[in-house]
Amino acid sequence: IKDYYRVVNKPQLREASEFVVTKNTQNNYPIFTDNAWQINFYFKNTFSRVIEDDSLIHVPNAKKVWLFSSSDQIENSVADNFVLVEKHHFHQVNVLLLERNQ
């Protein structure tokens, strides 16, 4: 029981969301994920809303987008249309800044 509090056991959605909130204040890029119901909680006091679409099919004409990814499969599925600009690792969740291919 004592080790439970020493090791991160749950996805670090709060930390990942705080990171995106601080990085996204100037540009306000769209934010996408496959579990918006969880992540939107951390964006409730911001102007950003998370869009539930991990395939990025419905991306508006934004040059760059943020993607919360819990698996490499999601990251590989968007590789045809986007270039990876930044990737930040948190426990059980990655945050990617993607730029649309020209």
Image (cartoon, rainbow, N blue to C red):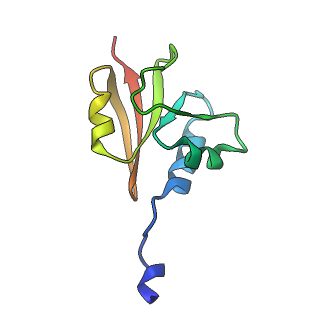
Furthest-right residue in this view = 45
- Residue toward you, 93 or 85: 93
Can you give x and y, in whole percent of width and height, for residue 65 in the image? 47, 28
Can you give x and y, in whole percent of width and height, for residue 9 in the image? 43, 69
The image quarter containing residue 36 is top right
Left or right of 52 in this view: 44: right
Furthest-top residue in this view = 102
- Which residue is at a point 34% across and 10% down the rendered structure image? 102
Can you give x and y, in whole percent of width and height, for residue 66 in the image? 47, 33
**The N terminus appears in which quarter of the rendering?**
bottom left
The image quarter containing residue 92 is bottom left
The image quarter containing residue 96 is top left
- Which residue is at a point 58% across and 27% down the rendered structure image? 27
- Which residue is at a point 32% across and 46% down the rendered structure image? 71
Count of labels in the image: 0
- Which residue is at a point 58% across and 45% down the rendered structure image? 37
Furthest-bottom residue in this view = 2
